[in-house]
Amino acid sequence: MADSDPYLRQPCLTMHGIPMVNAFAHNWERIDTFQSRPDDIVVVTYPKSGTTWVSEIMDMVLKGGDPEKCKKDVIWERVPMMECAAPGVLPPGSTKQLEAMPSPRIIKTHIPAHILPKSFWENRCKVTGWNEPTWRDPTPIREHPALLGPCKSPHATKLSADGLCGTVSPFMRKGTTGDWKNHFTVAQNERFEQDYAQKMSGTDLCFRTQI
């Protein structure tokens, strides 16, 4: 049976040479022409690299370190993702949401810096990021809402699960370097190493896979 949602699990579309989520790519002009403000703060990250943590930190800094002020709404309302769009659910996308927000705004995005709206550079917005492997940090993480205690945000605990996949999967990993050994067989590792060497030849990238 064909899915009634024309954007669900569709192939990525290419925007300025970058693969983009199908639903986000439609009406991309709204991104290219987005008007920034001089006091905007832009959090630019790779997906799944600590974006929400950085967003929460930036929001708390703006709110004077008062955690109670940060609990007044969910993070994606306080720090919208600029390119996010859900046709039929959020037709205008987050750009309309951002336009209505008071300054100073915190804007989250996974768009590579070289294709960000020109207005970010013209207005010299503050761009923040985090590029330090966590295994180098000797300080233990003392609080983690999913592992060491209940979620402290009342908004997060009341969220509906409508629209989410009904199956249960272990989303949280151990967070330690080298855990892949518990999942890869010797043959799988050898195949991965061969494929990696072939596709990454000619680059100077080096990743630590064990400590």
Image (cartoon, rainbow, N blue to C red):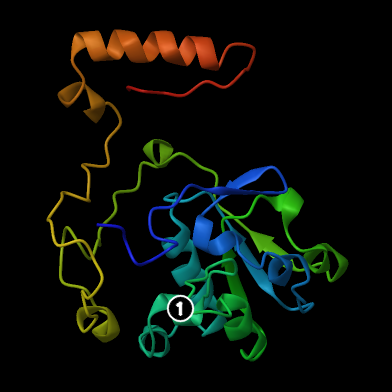
Q: Nearer the viewer, residue 64 or 145?
A: 145
Which residue is the site of mark 1? 88
101 up-or-down from 35: above or below: below
Where is 132 relative to 166, above or below? above
Left or right placement of residue 204 versus residue 81 in this view: right
Q: Residues within 10 Å of mark 1 (few under 14, many from 20)?
A: few
Is the residue 158 above or below the residue 109 in the image?
A: below
- In x, y percent, where is residue 204? 62, 17
**Nearest the eye: 114 or 132:** 114
The quarter of the picture where the N terminus appears is: bottom left
Which residue is located at x 68 percent, y 61 percent?
127
Q: Position of residue 166 (x, y in %)?
A: 14, 62
The C terminus lies in which quarter of the figure? top left
What amino acid type should be assigned to the residue bearing mark 1?
A: Gly
Left or right of 106? Residue 78 is left
Residue at (56% x, 81% y) in the render: 62
Please state the horizontal and vertical placement of residue 182, each as a whole percent of the image: 16, 25
Which residue does the image show at 27% across and 26% down from the upper left?
178
Residue situated furthest right in the rendering: 122
25 and 202: which is toward the camera: 25
Q: Position of residue 25 (x, y in %)?
A: 60, 60
Q: Secondary structure at mark 1?
A: loop
- Residue in view at x 48 percent, y 47 percent: 11
- The total of numbered circles placed on residues is 1
Task: Classify residue 40 as left or right of residue 139.
Answer: right
